[in-house]
Image (cartoon, grey):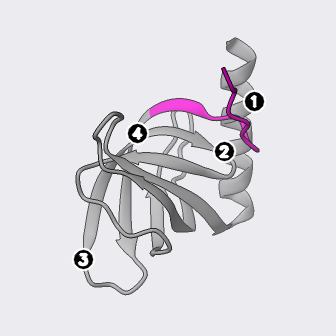
């Protein structure tokens, strides 16, 4: 059995992501975040953007007061045939606060596991 290798540790979460597409065609949408890493997140939804779509995401992690904001791109989609429907988004750009908050969250949560 092969084991999938990931660049970043993913931490399960249950947080709401507000998302706007880069073209501004769809207004503000809300998605359930299922996991997060410093590199990106998985957003559970039946509403799927095409891979390569630019997004602006905003969410607040547990134990953090300020929201995280990032420019992201849809890296892949799952239509839900054998797995949960949703999108993997890759963070492309974020401020120092957002990056540090995700790093703290991953470190803190991973240490408890």
Q: Which residue is mark 4?
A: 15
Residue at screen point 73% across, 36% down? 5
Q: For marks 1 and 4, give the CA distance.
A: 18 Å
Question: Residue 2 colored magenta?
Answer: yes
Q: Earlier in the sequence, mark 2 or mark 3?
A: 3
Question: Is residue 22 shown left or right of residue 35?
Answer: left
Q: Which residue appears farthest toward the top when viewing the image?
A: 113
Asked which secondary structure carries label 1, the reply is helix
Where residue 91 sits, quadrant-wise, is bottom right
Question: Is residue 6 shown left or right of residue 17?
Answer: right
Q: Nearer the viewer, residue 102 or 81?
A: 81
Q: For marks 3 and 1, give the CA distance.
A: 34 Å
Q: Nearer the viewer, residue 49 or 64?
A: 49
Asked which secondary structure carries label 2, the reply is helix
In this rendering, the answer to whether 74 lies above or below 79 is below
Q: Are circles 2 and 3 on residues that touch, CB within 8 Å?
A: no
Image x and y of residue 113, in percent:
67, 12
Q: Earlier in the sequence, mark 2 or mark 1?
A: 2
Q: Which residue is mark 3?
A: 26
Which region is colored magenta? 1-13
Q: For marks 2 and 3, give the CA distance.
A: 27 Å
- Badge 4 crowding class, 10 Å Cα cut-off, few under 14, some 14 to 19, many 20 or more, is some
Q: Which residue is mark 1?
A: 107
Q: Which residue is mark 2?
A: 102
Q: Are circles 1 and 4 on residues that touch, CB within 8 Å?
A: no
Q: Which residue appears farthest toward the front when viewing the image?
A: 1
């Amino acid at each position: 059995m092969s084991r999938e290798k990931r660049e970043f540790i993913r931490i399960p979460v249950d947080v709401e992501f507000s998302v706007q597409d880069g073209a501004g065609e769809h207004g503000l949408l809300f998605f359930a975040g299922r996991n997060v890493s410093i590199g990106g997140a998985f957003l559970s939804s039946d509403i799927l953007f095409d891979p390569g779509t630019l997004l602006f995401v905003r969410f607040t992690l547990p134990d953090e007061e300020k929201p995280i904001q990032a420019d992201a791109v849809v890296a892949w989609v799952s239509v839900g045939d054998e797995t949960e429907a949703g999108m993997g988004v890759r963070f492309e750009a974020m401020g120092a606060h957002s990056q540090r908050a995700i790093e703290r969250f991953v470190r803190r949560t991973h240490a408890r596991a």
